[in-house]
Image (spheres, rainbow, N blue to C red):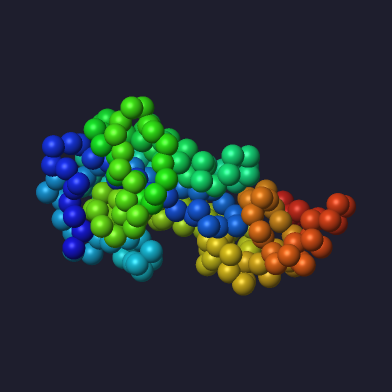
């Protein structure tokens, strides 16, 4: 059973990200403030839930939360500042858009950067321990999956409607066959070393546009 809060004395916002390990697409993050009495027996770390159950929980979280916000950071920014900083930036942006200011921030994982002087607590596997972090993980994941399904319409070659930009064999085979597009994270290991070298040799890299 998820814990409803870390401290009853503070307004807590749970934060989590989705898409950190992907080869393509933005990293998304969500911040959620839940009522202290919020309970839902199906809520858990989004990675442990089916797509159907995540979709069922999303409107419940949005309706029952005191405040929630979702943000994204582009592949270009990820390449510029690195994925860890981009993930934290996405969380900060989500916190910026909350309609209520939290007094304590609960963050999934072990890394965060101080936000506007508000105390924070990093919690490893926090999305399977605290309801607000689990709720943030569900929102970040569902919003990102929806975004990748939309991108799939313009870039069907990569089948992002199924793999969502993660480094599956299917996705990597498509990169090898069709090259990259503007939604790929160019600082990531897109292919095994031998294929990566071939794909990115000067003058030999192919790039797909939405008009291709």
The residue shown at (35%, 55%) is: 124
Which residue lies most toward the top here? 116
The residue shown at (51%, 46%) is: 84
Locate the C terminus and report the quarter of the image it occupies: bottom right
Residue 207 appearing in the image: yes
Q: Position of residue 107 (x, y in %)?
A: 34, 46
Which residue lies most toward the right here? 203
Eyeballing the image, is 81 above or below 164?
A: above
Q: Could you say which is closer to the camera, residue 186 or residue 141?
A: 186
Q: Position of residue 8 (x, y in %)?
A: 13, 42
Q: Could you say which is closer to the camera, residue 54 or residue 11?
A: 11
Eyeballing the image, is 14 above or below 24?
A: above
Q: Position of residue 170 (x, y in %)?
A: 62, 71
Which residue lies most toward the bottom here? 169
Q: Is residue 184 left or right of residue 140?
A: right
Q: Is residue 26 left or right of residue 71?
A: right
The residue shown at (17%, 51%) is: 4
Image mark count:
0
Locate the N terminus and report the quarter of the image it occupies: bottom left
Eyeballing the image, is 197 above or below 74?
A: below
Residue 174 appearing in the image: no
Q: Could you say which is closer to the camera, residue 142 or residue 133?
A: 133
Q: Is residue 211 left or right of residue 86?
A: right
The residue shown at (58%, 69%) is: 168
Eyeballing the image, is 210 above or below 50?
A: above
């Amino acid at each position: 059973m998820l814990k409803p809060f870390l401290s009853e004395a503070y307004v807590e916002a749970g934060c989590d990200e989705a898409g950190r390990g992907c080869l393509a697409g933005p990293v998304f993050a969500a911040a959620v403030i839940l009522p202290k009495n919020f309970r839902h027996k199906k809520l858990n770390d989004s990675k442990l839930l089916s797509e159907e159950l995540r979709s069922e929980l999303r409107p419940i979280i949005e309706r029952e939360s005191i405040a929630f916000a979702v943000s994204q950071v582009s592949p270009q920014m990820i390449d510029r500042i690195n994925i860890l900083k981009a993930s934290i930036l996405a969380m900060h942006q989500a916190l910026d858009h909350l309609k209520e200011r939290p007094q304590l921030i609960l963050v999934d994982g072990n890394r965060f950067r101080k936000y506007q002087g508000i105390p924070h607590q990093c919690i490893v596997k926090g999305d399977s321990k605290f309801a607000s972090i689990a709720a943030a993980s569900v929102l970040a994941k569902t919003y990102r999956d929806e975004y990748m399904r939309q991108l799939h319409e313009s870039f069907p070659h990569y089948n992002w409607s199924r793999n969502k930009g993660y480094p599956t064999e299917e996705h990597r085979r498509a990169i090898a066959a069709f090259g990259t597009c503007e939604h790929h994270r160019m600082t990531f290991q897109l292919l095994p070393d031998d294929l990566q070298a071939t794909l990115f040799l000067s003058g030999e890299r192919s790039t797909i546009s939405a008009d291709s």
